[in-house]
Amino acid sequence: MYSINLDNLITEFPEEKIAVQKLAAFLDSASATTKATGTVRELTVPRIYDLIHPSSQRVLAKMLSRLVQQGIFKKIIRVESDALGGIGDFRSIEEVPTTIFDGRKGYEVKVNLENIRLIYRLERNFDK
Amino acid sequence: MAEDLSKTKLIVSLLHQTSSLPVVSEFLKEKGLTHSAGSWDVLLNKRIIPAISNHQISNDDLITLLSSAEECGHQHIFLYKCPKDTAIEIMARDRITGALKKMALQDLLTTPKVLEQPSDPQIVDVRWETAKTDLSLTIKEVSSRKYRRHLDTEQHDGKIYEVYGIVEERAVNVAKIHRNGLLEIRIASISNSNKYDSEVHRFRGHIKSLIPIDSFSELSLSVAKDRLWTERATLQKLIRYSDSTIRDEAGNALRAVTGSIQSDLSANPAVGNSLDYLLEQDENSYCEGANIWFNKSSELSADIHVLLTGDLNEFALPANCTEGDYNYVLHQLRQFNHRVS
């Protein structure tokens, strides 16, 4: 048994039962790490896919949407610098500006689609 | 029957875009024909048209050469998988023939189309590769793409204007399903972007009655990325690294890059070792992407550049290559994509 109950996901996606169980195991482990070290997990969709092996990215996107509604993950639209690393986090693609100050380079840059990354951050107290 | 020389000229013009003089020259040589040519004009008018007129080669021969040239390389490839039985059902001749009839495209089974830049994406070729049984099914689409190219910067009325021209280019996309359940979706490289989601989605929609993509799941290449990096010391004859990125689950990243793209990261162990340190110290770190070259060998006609970035099931071959080179790279990536204990 895992401390995080994801039965609702199994009910909605019964064919993904094994993937949901892997996700629950991962969340347990991540929760323990966060409590011990304070490290917050930030995961890309490909990384989550590799961790839990759902049947497709399309199904995974639906599952992640539910987990965001449950407050387990926070969805972040991150603008990254050409120099690597984030330079701005936004709640939706509509909020992303056309230009942004790149604090890693020290000047304003144009935001390109190629510099935008979708991140799922595990909320600090998601297991409460 | 006399061959259609206007079609010959179109095929040679497409070969000009996707292949090289030595490759076409070699094709003529293999047919036992006069093959030297210093320009495409000489190749067409002094070598190919006389050979066509004398029935020494046919337009079909040239189409086969074109297929080999334009279907391999200068692409982003997305890999999917399904159970073998499902793949066999999907590529069954009766099912595909029926689907093509509904689309009024059954003629493609005997005569592939040769198109330069159609106004809408069109399926131009559907064919099986067969030995004792059907081994794979290939579906080819040709489309026109528009993208913007920066031309100039103008300044007037106290404002600066960036001027872009609209460039139209021909794109060849290919879907190839294998009997073992592997599906390759090969999308022609987009000139000014690394985002392929919408183009993959559109192409999948276009061919969905032939290959229903919902039957497939993405084939992650993560194991191959990890293994190629961690085993690089023993793979120095096979590959060289231009860059590699290791990321952890806190979102931190380390990237090692060579000064020149011709250099090899393995030539300076200290740089690579720093990435190894992160991999060893953090069990939740992983190789997120890499820029590698498969070295020329008896099995490869040239050094082949491979991008292992983008989506989890994506790799890219930025330059055109031979079918043999393409198949070699795909085989190597699939080999390394098996975890070893």
Image (cartoon, grey):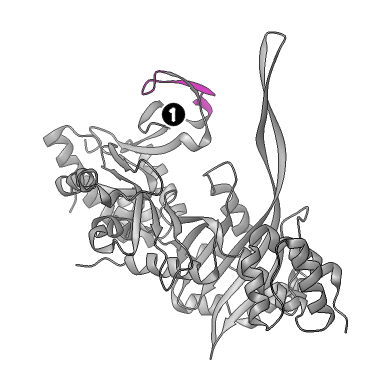
In the image as oriented, which residue stretches furthest toward the top? B158
Q: Is residue B41 toward the left or the right of residue B320 in the image?
A: right
Relative to B95, residue A72 above or below: above
Q: Tell me the quarter of the image containing the N terminus of chain B.
A: bottom right
Q: Is residue A97 magenta?
A: yes
- Give me the residue at 65% from left, 78% from top: B29
- Give me the residue at 44% from left, 50% from top: B311
Report in which chain the residue with disc 1 lies.
Answer: A
Q: Name the element at disc 1.
A: loop
Q: Is residue B104 magenta?
A: no
Visible in this render: residue A3?
no
Quadrant of the rendered image containing residue B74: bottom right
In the image as oriented, which residue stretches furthest toward the right? B2
Q: Residues within 10 Å of mark 1 (few under 14, many from 20)?
A: few
Relative to B188, residue B178 above or below: below
Between B15 and A41, the one lying in front of the other is B15
Q: What's the amino acid at mark 1?
A: Arg
Q: Is residue A16 toward the left or the right of residue B184 in the image?
A: left
Quadrant of the rendered image containing residue A56: bottom left
Which stretch is magenta? A94-106
Between B70 and B90, the one lying in front of the other is B70
Relative to B341, residue A9 above or below: above
The residue that label 1 is drawn on is A91
Q: Position of residue A113 (x, y in %)?
A: 52, 35
Q: Position of residue B46 (x, y in %)?
A: 80, 70
Between B41 and B235, the one lying in front of the other is B41
